[in-house]
Amino acid sequence: MSSKLKSYRFRRNPSSSKKSSQFTLSDEQKQEIREAFDLFDTDKDAAIDSHELKVALRALGFHVKKDEIHSLMALYDEDETGHVTFQQFLTICTEKMADRDPLDEIRKAFMLFDDDKSGTITVKNLRKVAREIGENMSDEELHAMIDEFAKDREGEISEDEFLAIMRNNGDDF
């Protein structure tokens, strides 16, 4: 499978609890968090306010509401400056990522591929995703990807097959 199509990374130790102290971010995840922080630190003061925090978290895929932002600010803005630093933001993101359910994340990834809601991933679905991410793949390559992983149906990957692919190869993604 193309490395660009393998963009979902699950690095949690399956035996660990959901505590962030036992959850390790990959270098790529840390870089993504740094980029979001820097992007939304609009006044470049090395800190973000509650509005910037909300937008940055949403950009990273976290659905946060106003009351949660207020709670996070109360918890992490210890000096009551109205801002959180990058280190505090990193801690917030690490905790949020640790709380994610990897199985739920894999299902969300499946839904991104299964844009026609057919319950399967077809060559047509792969072609669309490949184009969206700028990956130029031939129909032959797309068919080969499907054929490699499709066990139950010819020419389609079911959700169960997708879950098995992502679980069995999680360290390779």
Image (spheres, rainbow, N blue to C red):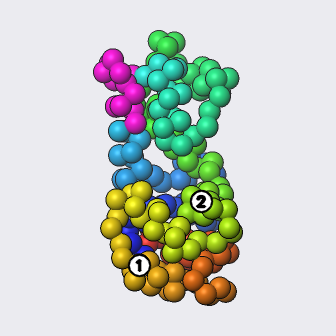
Q: Which stretch appears magenta?
A: 36-47
Given residues 33 and 39, the one toward you in this image is: 39
Q: How many labels does the image show?
A: 2
Position in image of residue 60 (x %, y %): 49, 41
Q: How crowded is mark 2: few (under 14 residues within 10 Å), some or many (20 or more)?
A: some
> Tag 2, which secondary structure?
loop
- 169 relative position to 103: left or right: left
Q: Is residue 37 magenta?
A: yes
Amino acid tagged 2: Asp
- According to the picture, the residue beneath numbered tag 1 turns out to be 139
Amino acid tagged 1: Asp
User: Is 116 above or below relative to 85?
Assistant: below
Q: Is residue 133 magenta?
A: no
| Quadrant of the snapshot with the C terminus | bottom left
Position in image of residue 35 (x %, y %): 35, 39
Name which residue lies at 47% across and 12% down: 81
| Alpha carbon distance from label 1 to label 2 | 18 Å
**One can see residue 92 in this view:** no
Position in image of residue 163 (x %, y %): 62, 71
User: Is 21 above or below relative to 83?
Assistant: below
> Tag 1, which secondary structure?
helix
Position in image of residue 103 (x %, y %): 65, 62
| Quadrant of the snapshot with the N terminus | bottom left
Q: Residues within 10 Å of mark 1 (few under 14, many from 20)?
A: few
Name which residue lies at 41% across and 64% down: 130
- According to the picture, the residue beneath numbered tag 2 turns out to be 115
Name which residue lies at 40% across and 83% down: 140
Name which residue lies at 50% across and 29% down: 55
